[in-house]
Amino acid sequence: MIASASLAALLVLCFAWELWLAPLRPGGSLIALKAAPLALPLAGIFAGRRYTYQWSSMLALAYFAEGVMRAWSERGTSQTLAAAEVVLSVVFFAAAVSFARLTRASA
């Protein structure tokens, strides 16, 4: 539940950030496509597939890195949105890793 909600929120945040909230260029830019990879694991996350949780947790690290860099280098609305990206990516990563650990087969 937490993983799917944070992944969906991160997807919406990335699109909205680059298209409406604080785009690099007025009217939006193609950098909004950075959110597209977040759509790939959605079906598997909603279905509760352990393998999807495993590989998508690594995907979240790229969004964490981007959020940290932009929170450090930008000011104003973009800085706030970058901080939100960091929080959402950390929440998703922690939830995905926790789910993967809880559902592993006992050795």
Image (cartoon, helix red, strand yellow):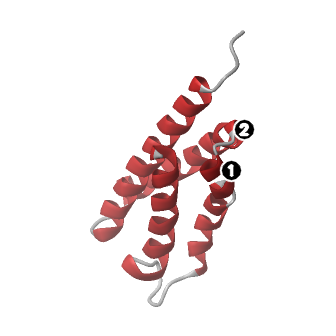
Q: Give the residue drawn at x 45%, y 45%.
A: 2
* 81 displayed left or right of 23: left
* Total numbered labels: 2
Q: In which quarter of the image is residue 26?
A: bottom left
Q: Do the residues labelled 2 and 1 touch (CB within 8 Å)?
A: yes
Circle 1 residues within 10 Å: few <14, some 14–19, many ≥20: some
SS class, disc 2: helix
Residue type, mark 2 in image: Tyr
Q: Give the residue drawn at x 55%, y 82%.
A: 29
Depth check, front residue: 83 or 42: 42
Q: In which quarter of the image is residue 78?
A: bottom left
Residue type, mark 1 in image: Gly
Q: Name the residue under label 2.
A: 51
| Above-or-below relation of 101 to 99 | above
* 100 displayed left or right of 11: right
- Residues at marks 2 and 1, CA–CA distance in whole angstroms: 8 Å
Q: Position of residue 39 (x, y in %)?
A: 64, 62
* 6 displayed left or right of 71: right
Q: Where is residue 72 in the image (x, y as percent from the top left)?
A: 36, 53
SS class, disc 1: helix
Quadrant position of the C terminus in the picture: top right
| Above-or-below relation of 105 to 87 | above
Label of residue 44 in the image: 1
